[in-house]
Image (cartoon, helix red, strand yellow):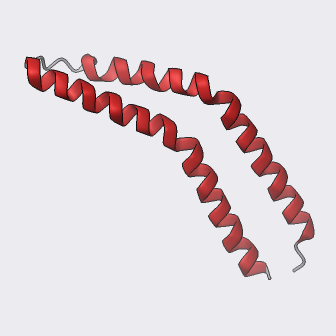
Amino acid sequence: MASSYFIHLAQKSFTVLMLLVGPPLIVSLVVGLVIGIFQAATQIQEQTLTFVPKLIAVFLTLLLLSGWMLNLMVDFTGQMFQEMAKVRF
């Protein structure tokens, strides 16, 4: 039972990790792609032009989704503590 529990724990942890990290990464990717296309079209090669908009977009994404992310982490932590109490080695 212990090995199946740890496999289940790893799968659930990975799923929660992807749900938490996915939105900011996707937003950063889209903003970077748009800025890259803009730079290629205008031939402006300023380094801060890619960094600052991505930083602002990721910050706004985290700000907007922070409540959902916190609820997801609290629920996951509560479930893990409940499941750990049931494990018998």
> How many badges with numbers are in the image?
0
Across and down, in percent, residue 57 comes to 44, 22
- Report the residue at 87% width, 80% height from top: 89
Residue 69 position, x and y percent, is 66, 36
Q: Residue at x 42, y 38 (%)?
A: 26
User: Which quadrant of the figure contains the N terminus?
Assistant: bottom right
Above/below status of 17 relative to 46:
below
Is 6 situated above or below 66?
below
The foreground one among 6 and 29 is: 29
Q: Position of residue 85 (x, y in %)?
A: 92, 64
Residue ID at (24%, 24%): 35
Q: Is residue 84 left or right of residue 16?
A: right
Q: Is residue 80 left or right of residue 70?
A: right
> Based on the displayed image, in which of its 4 quarters is residue 32 positioned?
top left
Q: Is residue 24 left or right of residue 88?
A: left
Which of the 4 image quarters holds residue 38? top left
Residue 5, placed above or below residue 59: below
Q: Is residue 88 left or right of residue 27?
A: right
The residue located at (61%, 29%) in the rendering is 65
